[in-house]
Image: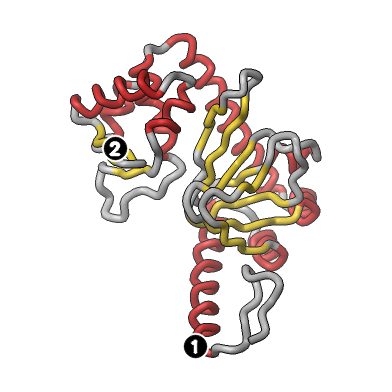
Amino acid sequence: MTKSKNPDTVLSVGNPTENARRQALQAQQRTRLRSMLQNDHIEAATIETLLAEGRLNSVAAGTPVSWAGQPMSDLLLVVQGALKVSRVGVDGRRHVTSFPGPGQWFGLIPIIDGEGAVHDAWAHGDALLLRVPRAVFLRCLDTDRLLNRTMVLRLCQRSRLIYDTLADDGLLPLRARTARALDRIAIGFPPPLDGSVQMRIAVSQEEIADMLGVTRQSANQELKQLERDGLITLGRGMVELLDRDRLRAVGKP
């Protein structure tokens, strides 16, 4: 059986049934991807360029997609799953910063300024990414005013989040910071299809502690209290948010 060197884009020729299944799956993925790009309010011609010149890439859990300080050749759009984004401090401790999920772009800063990646990032569980070559993205920026505006707004939103997080670290008690961190993590995960206020996020207590910059024991104490208050349910490698509105209330300054 002859196989392509790139398993993400070209199918094998030996099994027509398997080929048809994969083609149907790719068509579904591209339909979902087109809808995501349309939600970014960019020009139709740009969407078609990104779909034609970008590459869908299936990434296994734990696979690195960027290293801090290293150049990035592709801008990444998360189609399915999530990424775990982090930095290592001067003391050698790793600090988890975010979990970008479906519809979120990763790598905007290094792709735009041509410098190294700001963060390390891995697939948080199996993920599907759209890889857009830097040259293609920059060409689209030159020709699509709406894409420019969308990306500027994305960078503004992230800047506000950074400023809010810095303020939280100095002004809020740990319980409020924990509640706000859980709400922010949830942004990277798809909402329940039934419209329920309950939401499950695949994140461990150790990862939450890394985000907060505290020990696992300290984070566990706050999470247990939120669980006793009926706001969350803790599980193995996951947290179920029972009511995000009440969680946000706890996180208010």
Q: Measuring 48% from the left and 27% from the top, which residue is drawn there?
A: 211
Local packing at callout 2 (Cα closer than 10 Å; few below 14, some 14-19, many 20+) is many
Quarter-wise, where is residue 5 in the image?
bottom right
Q: Is residue 38 visible?
A: no
Q: Measuring 49% from the left and 55% from the top, which residue is drawn there?
A: 126
Q: Is residue 202 visible?
A: yes
> Which amino acid type is shown beneath numbered disc 1?
Thr
> Which amino acid type is shown beneath numbered disc 2?
Leu
State the separation of the CA atoms marked 1 and 2.
41 Å
Q: Which mark is residue 241?
A: 2
Q: Position of residue 249 (x, y in %)?
A: 30, 23
Could you tell whether 11 is left or right of 188 in the image?
A: right
Is residue 85 or residue 191 the one in the foreground?
85
Q: Position of residue 75 (x, y in %)?
A: 68, 49
**Residue 247, relative to residue 53: is it above or below?**
above
Q: Which mark is residue 17?
A: 1
Q: How many marks?
A: 2
Q: Measuring 68% from the left and 62% from the top, which residue is drawn there?
A: 54
- CB atoms at circles 1 and 2 under 8 Å apart? no
Quarter of the C terminus within the rendering: top left
Could you tell whether 129 is left or right of 32 in the image?
A: right
Q: Earlier in the sequence, mark 1 or mark 2?
A: 1
Could you tell whether 4 is left or right of 21 in the image?
A: right
Q: Position of residue 129 (x, y in %)?
A: 58, 56
Q: Position of residue 188 (x, y in %)?
A: 46, 43
Could you tell whether 247 is left or right of 69 in the image?
A: left
Local packing at callout 1 (Cα closer than 10 Å; few below 14, some 14-19, many 20+) is few
Quarter of the N terminus within the rendering: bottom right
Q: Label 1's element?
A: helix
Is residue 224 or residue 32 the one in the foreground?
224
